[in-house]
Amino acid sequence: MKNVTDSFVSLGHWPSAGSFGFNTDILATNPINLSVVLGVLIFFGKGVLSDLLDNRKQRILNTIRNSEELRSGAIEQLEKARARLRKVEIEAEQFRVTRYSEIEQEKLNLINSTYKTLEQLENYKNETIHFEQQRAINQVRQRIFQQALQGALGTLNSCLNNELHLRTVSANIGMFGAMKEITD
């Protein structure tokens, strides 16, 4: 320590004894100032720095704990979501199968209904054709009967004389009278 004080005195920068002044020699004063500042910082700042580091460590640990809790909560929610997804997928598959079978059943019902409608239409067509055939046959019969009747009347008119005509009319009137008596 004697050397240190001698260096200050020998440099000649200190004013006379009892007064206060600054040493402007950078090489001589910086190491001393730094050692004093570091000593004061270490002595007084040791507790503060330790508290700051402990607080920082505690915040980091709390953040890690919170992150772990959030992570476990997220994993739990993910598992729940996966379970719901599986359940929904199963329900969707069941719905799809059910709807598919319903659609197939509706398709079969529609085919059967169409087949029955076609059968009915075929029957109506056949009945209509049969009816039209009977009507055509009746018209042809009626026409043939009219033509035959006209031919017979023509033949009768040409062959009949008045006496034969009167006898035929009388015979027919007699037949009609007999028929009337039978029906009454």
Image (spheres, helix red, strand yellow):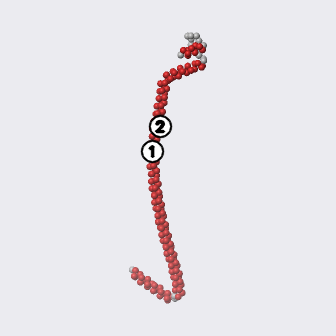
Name which residue lies at 46% across and 55% down: 97
Give the amino acid type for the residue marked by disc 1 in the picture: Glu
Rendered position, 22 above or below 86: above
- The residues tagged by marks 2 and 1 sit, at their Cα atoms, a distance apart of 18 Å
Name which residue lies at 58% across and 10% down: 16
Name which residue lies at 48% across and 30% down: 56
User: Is residue 157 in view?
Assistant: no
For the residues bearing labels 2 and 1, Cβ distance under 8 angstroms: no
For marks 2 and 1 on the same chain, the one whose residue lies earlier in the sequence: 2
Farthest top residue in view: 17
Residue 10: horizontal and vertical position, in percent? 59, 13
Residue assigned mark 1? 79
Rendered position, 165 above or below 76: below
6 and 124: which is toward the camera: 6
Circle 2: element type: helix
Rendered position, 102 above or below 56: below
- On residue 120, the disc is none
Residue assigned mark 2? 67
User: Is residue 123 in view?
Assistant: yes
Give the amino acid type for the residue marked by disc 2 in the picture: Ser
Farthest front residue in view: 3
Crowding at mark 1 (Cα within 10 Å: few <14, some 14-19, many 20+): few
Residue 1: horizontal and vertical position, in percent? 53, 16
Residue 158: horizontal and vertical position, in percent? 54, 87
Residue 20: horizontal and vertical position, in percent? 56, 13
The C terminus lies in which quarter of the figure? bottom left
